[in-house]
Image (cartoon, helix red, strand yellow):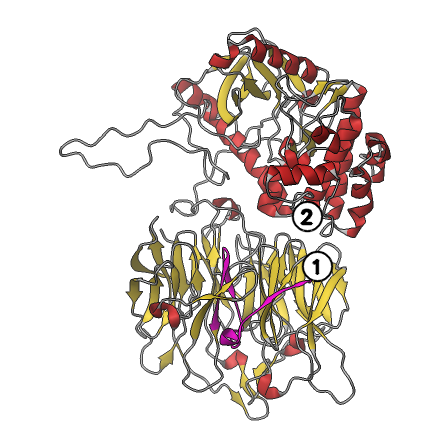
Amino acid sequence: MGQMLGPLREGAPRHIGPYEVLARLGAGGMGEVYLARDTAPGAPPGTYVALKTIRTDVAGEPAFRERFRREIRVAGMVRSAYAAAPVGGDPDAGTPWLATAYVPGPSLAQAVRRGGPLPVATVRALGARIARALADLHAAGVLHRDLKPGNVMLAVDGPRLIDFGIARAGGATTMTATGVIVGTPSFMSPEHVAGARHVTGASDVFCLGSLLCYAATGEDPFGEGPVAAVLYRVAQAEADLTRLPEELRAVVTACLSRDPADRPAPEALAELLGGTAGRPPAWPEAVREHIGEYGRELAQLVASGGPLLEVPAAPAPTSGTPASGGPGLHAAPTVAPLPVPVSPPTPQRRRRRGLIAAVVALAVLGGGVGTYLLWPEPAPKKPATAGPPAASGPRVPGVDDRGLADASGVVPQNAAQRPAGWKPWRAKLSAPAFGCSGNEKALVCRTTDGWYEALDPANGKKLWEASAGGAGRGGQSYMNDHGVPWIVDKASRPTVHDSVVVLAWEGRLQVRDVRSGAVRWESKEPMQGTQREVTRPIVADGTIFAAVAGPSPDGVIHPPIGMAAFSLTDGRKLWSKMLTSDEIPYSETRPFEPVAYAKGQVYALSDGGLVTYDARTGELRGQVDRAAAECEAVKVLGDSAYCVSTPHVVDAEERLHVLDAATLAAKGTVPASLESLSADVISPKAFAGFAKEGLGVYDPKDGTRLASYPLKDTAPAGLKQELSSPLLAGDRLVFADYSALYTVGLGADGRPGGLKATPVPGAPGPRAEEDERDPNYGIVYGRRIRQPEVLPVGGIAYVVYDKGAVASVELPR
């Protein structure tokens, strides 16, 4: 039940018992699990179940049929608001089956793998409800015996415990008839491992402690490695809780006591975690979106009026018949941004399809057995654009000119992130743009006068505006003669992340609601503020990483600079480290700040070069070698990190370095063709960036140049324009100048296609240079011709120009 909907295989049953089989949910050792609809007379309309079946060859063996009979009997004993409700079963049918309520959502394991660890408050609420489910099971004389993240499903109104395949009534042993231990090694109890004659309710509590640790850290508390080693650590109750938030440590430690008598009872544990009264768990935005994908997929299937079927493979081409380039079968999707492929509706179903909408009311569970309400929807309006939807991919929390937090320049495109009612638009900020970030909820830009303005991605209308330091409009940001920026109130670029935007300036860190602009919390930590035009907070893993000011002795103009980690939820300071050790002279000023995040590590620039820290603890993990000491930023791809040295010598060339992502040690040399590439995009398919000859696209394995696109100056004489940094939006490289949006499609093998130019309505076009210098200050940013920014989200490109013009267009295909 942890998978999303897959097509029915050829020969799959269409009806089992009173159920119409609609799609495939997954498979196990003895059979398959289907999504099915109850068609029995009198059944509430829209009742959907997870239908577990036994394979025909296995069903003929009395031992397996008896085991399934026992599972049906145990499942029938389960009555809990926090467990998937049993509906019925028949162990004697030709195809034995067991039906439980269908839970439209991911498993806890899937949600954490995709969205990262859950906030402490969410873990508490989730744990209290699963503890309550265990209390209900134990009261009925049932032990679960396989409590693990894959057996906890996340629905919009809370978690559900599932899968009673190895559950037993009280007094059962921990082994099968053949002496094989049952359960999942990382989520067993010491009693399981010891093969004790009897497990107890305390064994389920131990497993729940392991599950809570996983939910809060994303890691198994007993580590990885050979099964024997994991089982030994479980047997000794040697859990690693160092990354567990302090607020959860006491209760999880109690659950993981080696002595079962020292573990809290499920009822007491539920209260220790905060009880189950009140609202359901506050799922993070990423989890809510994940759950929503399941609901949308179910809605699309229901609207189709028929089951999800495999598409027959195309016949082999004959003479004179072109070969088909499409795949033979539909694969079970991992996300659901696109309409689910379904069989064509019959004429009767087509009429029914016009009467019901593809909308599922997930919050309504009729009688706890999976009844979903459907309601009519007005006839759809003519779409604003005729272009196809964007390619599918995971949801991204926010995008800026570097891409995502790993700074690789790779931005997956998910059509579910296209704002409702979107159509092309153009808008104008109140002052020149100076760094933007956005997602499907809002586009937030810093302006050169130290303000922030938020636009609605659907139509370009202003949502809110705010001053960084409280100053009025009209201030100017500039660069002095030493090349050091002086930005109004040292306001950083904004970082949009899910439903919030993070802002930082001198002396202040602030988190606002991205739609309303309301301040959620504010910290008066001595923030360092902007050090370069590119300065921004890094947000990932429920944490904000930002530069902070160090101690400032009297007479010190440029005090040491540090970096701190703050809780995104409430602003608590988690840890801090110094990035510089002394006063920094003008000649050595660089952006000493966090620059990227990937796989639990945050990367920053220190006075000793790039360093990397454990994002949870702040423990130093590595530092660059001398050869890469001039690198100021890093891009992370898998187990490698790439940085470009920025020599402070006239006419010196930039140089690309490849480093170990964990330690930043030199990993090897890059091919000669890549050495002088700016490497704006680092992806498994291709490296891409601007070089002297134009845009280059290279094979990441050997540096072979796959394509080169000379970029001529298209500005008429006396006029000028700039190019944005390229990003990889789905399967297309994308960048812009002052007139057009440029795209280069990449094939499945990374081979680039032709360069396509698409005019951008509202683009300012090339313009004449103006006097950018102020005799008293230096270069004024608001007068300077600067590169535009392209933010690709959900198949839409938001193009921001330096003077404040903003355009929203569909990415061409």
Please tell me whether residue 639 belongs to the stretch shown in magenta.
yes
Viewer can see residue 155? no
Where residue 400 sits in the image (x, y, percent)?
Answer: 53, 62
In the image: residue 31, left or right of residue 748:
right
Pointer 2 residue: 217
Between 503 and 52, the one nearer to me in the picture: 52
Point 78% across, 25% down: residue: 200
Mark 2 residue element: helix
Residue 501 vs 239, above or below: the answer is: below
Amino acid at dot 2: Thr
Between residues 799 and 200, which one lies in front from this camera angle? 200
In what element is the residue under mark 1?
loop
What are the residue bounds of the magenta stretch? 618-644
Q: Which quarter of the rendered picture does the N terminus lie within?
A: top right
Find disc 1 in the rendering and name its residue: 617
What residue is rendered at 53% in x and 70% in y?
A: 633
Q: Is residue 503 above or below residue 270?
A: below
Task: Give the quadrant of residue 266.
Answer: top right
Q: Is residue 253 left or right of residue 651?
A: right
| Quarter of the view holding residue 725 | bottom left
On screen, residue 80 versus residue 752, left or right, reads: right
The percent position of residue 647, horizontal first and vertical second, equals: 48, 81
**Crowding near the residue tagged with mark 1, few <14, some 14–19, many ≥20 C-alpha atoms within 10 Å:** some
**Within the magenta stretch, is there residue 332?**
no
Q: CA distance from mark 2 to mark 1?
A: 12 Å
Q: What count of labels does the image hold? A: 2
The residue under label 1 is which amino acid type? Answer: Thr
Residue 149 position in % (x across, y down): 65, 36
Is there any visible trace of residue 474 in the rendered image? yes
